[in-house]
Image: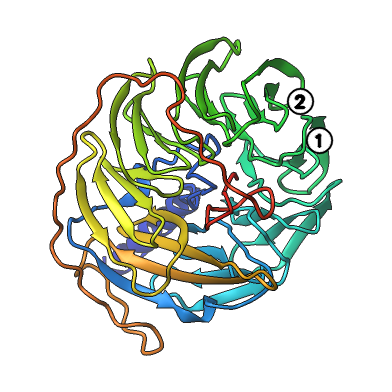
Amino acid sequence: MGEKTRHSEMSLLGLFLLVLCLIPAVPAQDMMYRYDAAHTGDYSPIAGVNGINISLLWIDSNFTYNASLGSESTPVAVNGIVYTTDINGNFYALNATTGVEQWDSPIYIHSSSPAVSNGIVYVGNFNGNVYALNAMTGTTIWDYPVQSSIECSSPAVANGIVYITSGNAVLYALNATTGRNIWDFAVGGSSDLSPAVSDGMVYVGSDNGNVYALDADTGEKIWNTTMNGGAGSSPLVKDNRVYISSTAGTEYAFDGATGEKIWTFKIVGGAEFDPALADNTLYISDNGNDLYALNAATGRQLWRVALSGTSPIIANGVLYLYIDNGNIVALNATTGLQIWEWQNAYSAGNGFIVIDNDVLYGHSFLNVLNPYRPTFTNTIFALDLNPGASHASTPSLTPVTTIPAPTVTPTSPITTPRSGIDAILIFGALGSCGVIFLFRKNRN
């Protein structure tokens, strides 16, 4: 009887192991510039709990450098790793919990932000190559040379294809596994803004004012339309609407299927930062001193607050903005009221932020202008949005510092759209993209 029981238990164990083998493995999360291939900037699905008290989890001082070249890439945090660049354009993978380096690759990235899909990291470099790297080891899987440098364009990956634009405004579609060129399309102009992918279509804008919609599989042009001024932001696609700003300071909403203009909205300070969209609200940071919330369907202004920063991101009803003095601000996405402001004591300048699993990761960039030799510095840090849940105790990293309770500052929302041009802000430029640090603007 005991022997039969053992055989029965072994049979059940074998059946259990067989079932485990037949269950498909849970795929690793994909992550790209502005969260997804459509560039929504909405991190709600992976943000976790957003607390009203925050603390510094870690800061990597090894990423603070002085150099004659500046790297302004937005980091990507996914599957326990943060992918980012140092000031010299070297590409790094850091442990998301501790900030400890996992691997590095000297491939010289300027402002192209990485995309991670199916265990592969894709990124464009300043020397004119698209790279596919093993996400765990950094080993090069393939690289593809394009016709010009990739300064700002960040790859979008969808259905096994990598989409990226080169500096001479050619949009490439590459096989994600092999790097083979599937098709390419001359956009025109001289920009290398990031393409957006949604529902079998690829959308891209150019410096010559054209906005294109292409078939994602074949590269066939479905429609194109023109804007007043060149493309100032990368397109954002949601609910079959394409949102994109012009360098003349106008935000456009186009029908994704036909290219028909749905609405326009004049941004007083100009808009060359990428917006975020969630719950039918579009959030735009202008090039001057304001942050806007618009009804995404109608273009009607919901509120406007005086904050100057880079591209906003959103997660679970909280809007996050890296402002000009280097601080991070959190706002109620519905009202525009400030929830808290983190006083960044570790680096000045502006930067880029992303969120994953209760943690906000920032890559700050500072350009100290010098008439003979510009100086640039970078710093990478992680803020715990849910203090007490997961603090690292790594001796080489800055200790956790608790931030005081937030102070809510009342605002007076503006509920009617402004019309006309109230002011024209003119900025000099060093390069064709980047954040505004006295002169520079980010446009990837």
Q: Is residue 79 visible?
A: no
Q: Are marks 2 and 1 in contact (CB under 8 Å)?
A: yes
Q: Residue at label 2?
A: 219
Q: Is residue 383 visible?
A: yes
- In the image, 426 versus 307, the foreground residue is 426
Residue 382 in the image: state x and y as whole percent. 37, 67
Residue 221 lies in quadrant: top right
The vertical placement of 229 against 111, above or below, is above
Query: Is disc 2 placed on a helix, strand or loop?
Result: loop
What is the spatial separation of the Cα atoms under label 2 and label 1, in whole angstroms?
9 Å
* Numbered mark located on residue 182 in the image: 1
Residue 360 in the image: state x and y as whole percent. 36, 59
User: Label 2 sits on what residue type?
Assistant: Gly
Residue 316 lies in quadrant: top left
Q: Quadrant of the C terminus?
A: top right
- In the image, 326 versus 46, the foreground residue is 326
Here the colouring is rainbow
The vertical placement of 144 against 254, above or below, is below
Residue 76 in the image: state x and y as whole percent. 51, 56
User: Label 1 sits on what residue type?
Assistant: Ile
Label 2 or label 1, whichever comes before in sequence order: 1
